[in-house]
Image (spheres, helix red, strand yellow):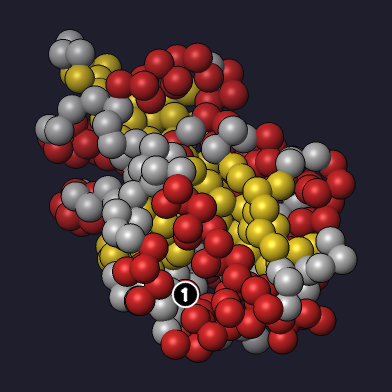
Amino acid sequence: MKNFEVWNLADDRQRYNKCLEKCNPRTVFHLTEYLLAEAEAENGITVVFYYEEDGMFALIPEVLRRINDLPYMVELEEELYDMITPHEYSGIISNSYDNALKNKLLKNILSYCRKNNIICQFIRLNPYLAELPLIYKENGFDVFHSNEQVYVNLEQTEENIMKQYRSNVRRNIKRAKREGLTFEIAEKNLFNVNAFQGMYRKSMYLLGARNFFYFNNRYFNKLIECDCSKLAFVKEETGKIIAASIMLLDRNTAYYHLGCSDREYALKRPMNYLMHSMILWSRRMGKQIFHLGGGHKSLMQFKEAYSETRIDYYVASQICDQKKYLNVCKKWKEQFSEIEDENYYPLYRYNE
């Protein structure tokens, strides 16, 4: 028996959770609580695509977004949508190791998109689901090697972990200790959450980050409520919070998700001390991997200073309706002709 279904995650969480329990491997980014938080950031609804055959199944959650909701697309003549996987990583998971199920799921999703005015998809592939780039490529997606991301192998001694740190990082950690900085996994109460939000948004402003990375209050509140999230602080001697991070934890991996610091205290090296402390804390919690991820040039230079180990990160995209996609892009170009970045995908969300 073959069966393809699509449902809104918020309408049937229990069914999704039952499926999730049977999937291996799965990641923290597939957890229901995280997906519902992320839908708030993406301004869409999380839908589950599910294909089953003879008791074996494959599924993927994606965020469905209405293009007409963009302020410069309100005059579109028809309802149009696109889909993106939840930030930060995703991909197909299954209760089977048979890749044929994943192929059939993707074919059914494409058919669904074409019937429901979903003009394109963008997939951020979790680097630890290593078989997925080839599967997406075989199903007509454009698969792009985005970068090599940094991770720390926690299945080694603390001494060996620190040997991989660059010499300036080790010096900065010693300085942070001399300055009396302390690390803690903080209680996720209103005061601490507000402290993190304020520092994080100020950091994004100073970095000139894209609007998406500011995140709205709904996202922060739902993210903090997740059991999988941990709030980490570095404080100076007076107890003032001068660096902070949100980590996401699954069974084997700790992900560095969001981080920030107070620039007034930069000389005390709180970010070096924060990253070092999170790595060692994750090891003590029995995790096997601490994933630092990637980023722009300066952020990558910061992360690369903690580990020599790398993992490939891919993204995949697919235009489901070429004519409608090009028409939307043309309408966008008519309004924003001064923007020249033709490589952004989807182009019409460049200045979102």
The x and y percentages for residue 146 are 36, 70
The x and y percentages for residue 325 are 46, 58
For residue 222, above or below residue 90:
above
What residue is rendered at 24% in x and 25% in y?
A: 95
- Out of 231 and 2, give the one closest to the viewer: 231
Q: How crowded is mark 1: few (under 14 residues within 10 Å), some or many (20 or more)?
A: many
Q: Give the structural element (helix, strand or loop) at label 1.
A: helix
Q: Quadrant of the rendered structure where residue 4 is?
A: top left
- Out of 73 and 54, give the one closest to the viewer: 54
Q: Is residue 338 left or right of residue 86?
A: right
Count up the numbered dots.
Answer: 1
Say which residue label 1 marks. 303
What residue is rendered at 38% in x and 30% in y?
A: 49
Q: In which quarter of the image is the C terminus?
A: bottom right
Query: Is residue 155 in view from this perspective?
Result: yes
Q: Quadrant of the N terminus?
A: top left
What residue is rendered at 22% in x and 52% in y?
A: 130
Query: Is residue 242 in view from this perspective?
Result: no
For residue 204, above or below residue 103:
below
The x and y percentages for residue 28 are 45, 40
For residue 13, above or below residue 45:
above
Q: Which amino acid does label 1 sit on?
A: Lys
Q: Quadrant of the rendered structure where residue 196 is?
A: bottom right
- Out of 247 and 278, give the one closest to the viewer: 278
What residue is rendered at 51% in x and 82% in y?
A: 169
- Out of 260 and 138, give the one closest to the viewer: 260
